[in-house]
Amino acid sequence: MKRFILNAEAPMTIPTADFIALCNRIGADPEFTRAGGGNSSAKTGTTLRIKPSGVPLATLREEDLIPLDIPTLLNALHSPAPEGGDPVRAAAERAQLGHHDRRPSVEILFHALIPDPLVLHLHPLTANAVTCNARGAALTEEIFGDQAIWVDYTDPGIPLALEIERQREVFQARHRKRPPRITMLGNHGVIVSGATVEEIDERVHFLTASIRAAIERAAADMEEQCLRVASHFKGATGAAAVAIAADEATRSDSERDAGPVSHGPLIPDQIVYAGSLPLLLDRN
């Protein structure tokens, strides 16, 4: 079993009220959270306190947090799965400290293995423009460099926790420094961790602003290319004026057989809260 060591930069205590206030603020902001959206945890020593399933971040209270023993969780992560039943639920039952009516998040294991005292997991719309992109890994490298880790889509629970752990170890071996505190989960969402509430808040906004800036640069590049093509076309044809319109492209992307419509959900929350495919109505 791997021994858990809390990040040495961690303060002795985390102001729980400040952490809850941050969760509530982010949970109420549609930029970061839509519908149920995400989970959060705080560590003190070898105890992990995590948001339970079914409680939105926007309304999370301190008394909702479920305390779990971190060494027990990590032991479950690196042990053979029990026969029958849900291995994550079994791990949670063994690790739970005290009695609680609610069930902790299914993602307790990656919360446990990340050594920072605060961990926040979200499915933000802007961030998912990268995580749910066919070029997600390359875009993550282009936008963040060594400030983020990319993890290909992996089923939640033990498989995802093990893959996150593996990618953290690969990064550490390759760069000879501790893994970054931003993890991009392919076709899923993001994990942000830190030693203080202020760090988490700053990192979440840095992540979003960096991706927004990249989107704006891409749009500007496309506009510049269109103007360049229009200029060449005007010169080649001797036209008095050239207009650029995207109406036809918009229509074709909205047709029944178009990729954005027929190739499945664009983001994970679409599957959970709206069904995998859109409702299609005939024009008449």
Image (tube, rainbow, N blue to C red):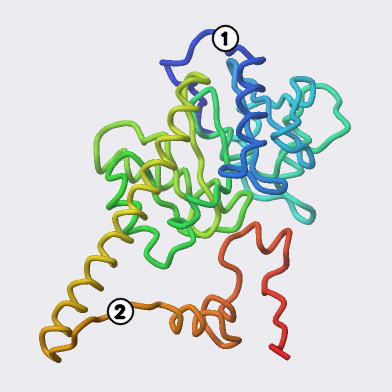
Coordinates of residue 203 in the picture (x, y in percent): 43, 32
Instruction: Locate the N terminus by quadrant.
Output: top right
Coordinates of residue 112 in the picture (x, y in percent): 58, 33
Q: Which residue is more in the foreground, 258 or 41?
A: 258
| Residue at image point 58% right, 13% down | 14
| Residue at image point 50% right, 27% down | 201
Image side of residue 145 versus residue 72, left or right: left
Instruction: Locate the C terminus by quadrant.
Output: bottom right
| Residue at image point 11% right, 84% down | 235
Image side of residue 94 versus residue 248, left or right: right
* Residues at circles 1 and 2 in contact by the CB criterion of under 8 Å: no
Q: Give the farthest residue toward the front.
A: 240
Q: Amino acid at mark 1?
A: Thr
Q: Give the farthest residue toward the right.
A: 101
| Residue at image point 63% right, 29% down | 25
The residue indicated by pointer 1 is 13
Coordinates of residue 106 in the picture (x, y in percent): 69, 45
State the image quarter where residue 26 is shown.
Answer: top right
Coordinates of residue 218 in the picture (x, y in percent): 31, 60
How far apart are the alpha carbons under marks 1 and 2?
62 Å
Image side of residue 60 versus residue 256, left or right: right
Q: Which residue is more in the foreground, 13 or 1?
A: 13
The residue indicated by pointer 2 is 243
Eye-nearest disc, 1 or 2: 2
Q: Which residue is more in the foreground, 12 or 261?
A: 261
Circle 1 sits in a helix, a strand or a loop, which is it? loop
Q: Amino acid at mark 2?
A: Ala
Image side of residue 7 versus residue 254, left or right: left
Which mark is first along the chain, 2 or 1?
1
Q: Label 1: few (<14), some or many (≥20) within 10 Å?
A: few
